[in-house]
Amino acid sequence: MSGTVSVPRYAQQNEVRLDPLQSALLIVDMQNDFVKPGGSLLVPDAEATVPAISRLLELARGRRMRVLYSQDTHREGDPEWRIWPEHCREGSWGWEILEELAPAAEDTVVRKVRYDAFYGTPLDHLLRLWSISTLVICGTVANICVHYTAASAALRWYDVVIPRDAVSALEPFDLESSLRQTAFVFGGSITTTDRLRIEPSSPSFPPTTCPPDPRKAFAERSELEGARHDD
């Protein structure tokens, strides 16, 4: 049986306020294979979201929010290639994150093997180390990796925010149904990039330092131990 199915209405927020010390931006799978012509699993509207995601990056970095990327990563024999065409082979051009959205030195890249960026990765561990309670999620594909990452975040009781102009899907219905589920089932906030307000709750903002970065602490400890051995 065929027919037309409409997505029920869902709430969209005119304004979403974020505390930069308790919020993080997660950019999902903005890689050449999904975004650029010649990519093996091209999402038609993904490249059109690059300006919005760039604005999110500028906003987050300007307010010293944590910025993370998920990077879809597959190797020979990956069973996901029985579902989808081969894509994001580790080390290939298609696997690389877009040059226009390249991670900065202080950003964190999480390599993932399934749709969910929490599955088998240290993402939850890092967010809790940094005392993050709200996750702003953007990228592609809206109803696949963005959706399952948002679901996983919500199940861990993170507040989820999705700027709708910064996500893309293979079909318009997939995009709308995913956003509806995020709002209706996960209690997430759907908005647009220009309606995000990043304002600190503490009058001492901006801090002189970001929240502790475990990578820096490990490097400093290694240098200290090396100096002791030299003595």
Image (cartoon, rainbow, N blue to C red):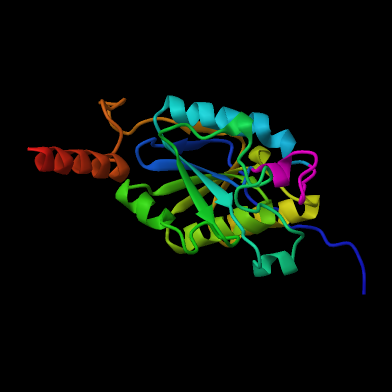
* Drawn side of residue 44 relative to residue 109, left or right: right
**Quarter in which the N terminus is drawn:** bottom right
- Is the stretch drawn in magenta largely helix, strand or loop? loop
Within the image, what quadrant is residue 6 found in?
bottom right
Q: Position of residue 140 (x, y in %)?
A: 66, 48
**Quarter in which the C terminus is drawn:** top left
* Drawn side of residue 107 relative to residue 6, left or right: left
Q: Position of residue 38 (x, y in %)?
A: 80, 42
Can residue 194 be seen?
A: no
* Drawn side of residue 92 relative to residue 135, left or right: right
The verdict on residue 35 being magenta is yes
Within the image, what quadrant is residue 205 found in?
top left
Q: Which residue appears at 65% of the width and 43% of the height?
A: 31
The front one of 102 and 8 is 102
The front one of 170 and 2 is 170
Q: Position of residue 131 (x, y in %)?
A: 32, 47
Q: Position of residue 222 (x, y in %)?
A: 21, 43
Q: Which residue appears at 33% of the width and 53% of the height?
A: 128
Q: Which residues are magenta?
A: 31-44
* 198 over 117 or under it: above or below: above
Q: Residue furthest right?
A: 2
* 174 over 77 or under it: above or below: above
Within the image, what quadrant is residue 114 found in?
bottom right
Q: Residue furthest bottom?
A: 1
* Drawn side of residue 193 relative to residue 82, left or right: left
